[in-house]
Amino acid sequence: MSRLHPGRVATVRVTVQEGGTSGEDEWPTIGRRLIVALLAGSPRVADAGRGMARVDARGWARRGGDPALGRTLRRAAAEAGFTGIGVGIADVPVASDAAAHLAATGASAGEPAGEVQIVEPGGAREFLAPLPLSVLPLSEELLKTFRALGLRRVADVADRPPEAFEARFGPEGVRAHRLARGIDDRAFRARELPDVPHASLELASPVDTLEPLLFVLRHLLARVCADLADAGRCAARLELELCSERGVETATAVPARPTRQERLLYDLCRAALERAAGAAGRLTEPVEQLALRVVRVSAPDARQEDLFTRRWRDPLAAAAALSRLRVRLGERAIVHPGVRADHRPESRSVWTPVEVEAEGGRSSGASDTPRASDTSGSFTASEASAASGPIPGVLHLLPEPLPLRVGTEADRPTEMWSEAGHHALAAAEGPERLSGDWWKDPYHREYFRVCTEEGALLWLFREYRPSGELRWWLHGWWD
């Protein structure tokens, strides 16, 4: 048991329809659905009564603070199908509950959504003072007594000495006085998450072929995915355990994006089993038991797209294709181009394996903003300046610079000969001098941007080697 005071707590209040079709109270089921949805904002969520849940609001200082948490909780509750959503954030539960009540009242009255009632640190008593006593969690009988005595607002109770309430109302009066002053030490009991989902089945007889195992795999995945949905989690890494007389063989399936889609996980696990069976399609040892275990879970990262968005893309479709390639070719077989700081242009690009993050579900190195790139992933200052103009140019670097023979006038290139033949140069700009790597492979280059009479824009350089030799090279071209 842990207490939130001092700290920050967020209360989420939603509208609950009274009376289900079965005639029974459906809040336990609905409340669990609300708690699962609010896990998007914090791993610690507690049931706070009918239509309410409290969230540990700490840890958001570097993620946008209380406003960002409030927006996240509202969005998560709305995506889970709840209406009349109010979010309040304060130091203590009594203030956050009252703030959520005010926000929910505005939401149910049709006021613009998106507002979150935030009580500044240390301002709980001042915030509660002008509010009616009904915002405090007091019994109906005590509220009626307070009204009969002329106590209407929270300040009417907070401004009086506590001895008067203790003498007349006993412990309940003392509690009411403390709550009115913004003192709330109620325990925060976070809902315990279920264990990591797993399922296993002992086979009637040992098998060394894939067909019986694939049949059992479907059954195990159905159970595991149901547990993931119930916990509001997605699988980021799964392990298949093939138990035989000689031991346990493990096969791993890692989706590119955490998911609980049964069909996608089945395809990944099937590919893992096929890889374990090899080209012959038979296992080395007969399997007596098959176990499926989710060894890493993550919060869902689903994003709903607009039906009328022109460039709509299904992220799960790309994730499914990437996942299958990773399983079949190896976890480090899929790479993406990256850029590293280096003066030498041909050394600026690097191929980095796509790694799946432990939390969040995004592949490392992925960029949300597309940009023009060359075939080697390199960029230069001239390309960056060109990209800001009306007609961007894209520099394509050759895998290896090609040797040239160049004619010059006044130390500037005027014509060139290569394997493709002779080309006269209509214009030349430069030189741009680069040097470095004196400790391992020193280079001294002068780069020129040249344009042939045919209109081709090329990037040439001449290099002075330590031996005194001077040679010309073609390093790339612009589109």
Image (cartoon, rainbow, N blue to C red):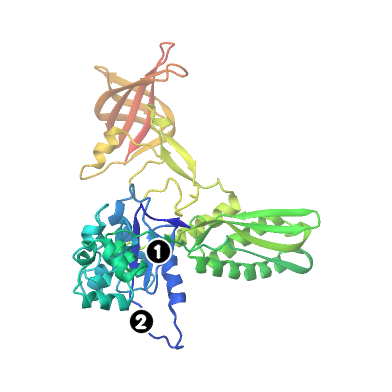
**Residue 394 placement (x, y as % from top left):** 32, 41
Q: Quadrant of residue 281?
A: bottom right
Q: Nearer the viewer, residue 401 or 288?
A: 288
**Residue 21 placement (x, y as % from top left):** 43, 88
Query: Compared to 394, does 4 lie above or below?
Result: below
Q: With 253 as the anchor, is 103 left or right in this view? A: left
Farthest residue, direction front: 167
Q: Nearer the viewer, residue 193 or 368?
A: 193
Q: Amino acid at mark 1?
A: Leu
Instruction: Say which element carries label 1.
Output: helix
Q: With 283 as the anchor, is 343 left or right in this view? A: left
The label on residue 264 is none
Q: Quadrant of residue 16?
A: bottom left
| Residue 454 in view of the camera | no
Q: Amino acid at mark 2?
A: Gln
The label on residue 38 is 1
Q: Nearer the viewer, residue 33 or 323?
A: 33
Instruction: Say which element carries label 2.
Output: loop
Question: Which residue position is annotated with label 2?
Answer: 17
